[in-house]
Image: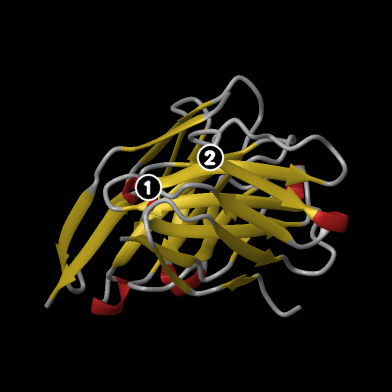
Amino acid sequence: AQSVTQLDSQVPVFEEAPVELRCNYSSSVSVYLFWYVQYPNQGLQLLLKYLSGSTLVKGINGFEAEFNKSQTSFHLRKPSVHISDTAEYFCAVSTSYGKLTFGQGTILTVHP
Amino acid sequence: GAGVSQSPSNKVTEKGKDVELRCDPISGHTALYWYRQSLGQGLEFLIYFQGNSAPDKSGLPSDRFSAERTGGSVSTLTIQRTQQEDSAVYLCASSLGRGWNTEAFFGQGTRLTVV
């Protein structure tokens, strides 16, 4: 079985500051990793994904994440956030079996 | 279709009534998921359909919950004898299938309110 832990339930940050949202996972098999974003009153949208290859993956809206197998982490980063990045972010993991398991979510609030 | 479609978008029901929530996945997607999202609970997995395999029902919270997927396409989530704690947003997602193709596309959800 797989599990995902998002270490911070809420992250407040000022506009134009850098941000890191942390995600750790556990799995006994190889995994595929995803970050989804949910803006207020909207559905979930894929931000980025790691399937294989380069451990640094870039996504939409200037976000990137780094897969670290030894630390079983997939932290999400952005060097400079905007007010419009205020949303809830979910880390997820799947295996070749296909079932997606999500973390509990991190609410990112960007203050002016 | 262009995306995952869920209906209704909002549903208000009286405690004890049965409700049916519908999900139309993206055409050609073999995998379909139901999740529940409630305040403070994150995304709770309910059930997973993959092609013709037996569904993974391990997330269904009680026997009042059931789901079916007809013809490998449309899915219906049924909640019998609804309780107030069933109030939540029910999200459906679909994907192309296993492994590399597990990127899930989500619908806008059905907001269920049990009064």
Residue at x-position 54% and y-position 35%? B59
* Chain where mark 1 sits: B
Residue A23 appears in the figure: yes
Q: Does label 2 or label 1 sit earlier along the sequence?
A: 2
Q: Amino acid at mark 1?
A: Gln
Q: Residues within 10 Å of mark 2 (few under 14, many from 20)?
A: few
Q: In the displayed image of the protein, which residue is found farthest to the top?
A: A28
Q: Position of residue B56 (x, y in %)?
A: 68, 34
Q: Pointers 2 and 1 in contact (CB under 8 A)?
A: yes
Q: Which mark is residue B64?
A: 2
Total numbered badges shown on the rendered structure: 2
Q: Residue at x 88, y 57 (%)?
A: B71
Q: Residue at x 52, y 50 (%)?
A: B35
Helix, strand or loop at label 1? It is: loop
Q: How is the image coloured?
A: secondary structure
Residue A18 seen in the figure:
no
Q: Does label 1 lie on the same chain as label 2?
A: yes
Q: Quadrant of the N terminus of chain A?
A: top right
Residue at disc 2, secondary structure: loop
Closer to the camera in the image, B51 or B112: B112
Give the residue drawn at x 71%, y 80%: B2
Categorize mark 1 by other alpha carbons within 10 Å: few (<14), some (14-19), many (20+). some
Give the residue number, with chain letter if any, for mark 1: B83
**Viewer-proximal residue among B67 and A90:** B67
Q: CA distance from mark 2 to mark 1?
A: 10 Å
Answer with the quarter of the image where residue B50 lies. top right
Location of residue B84 in the rendering, given as x and y in whole percent from the top left corner: 32, 50
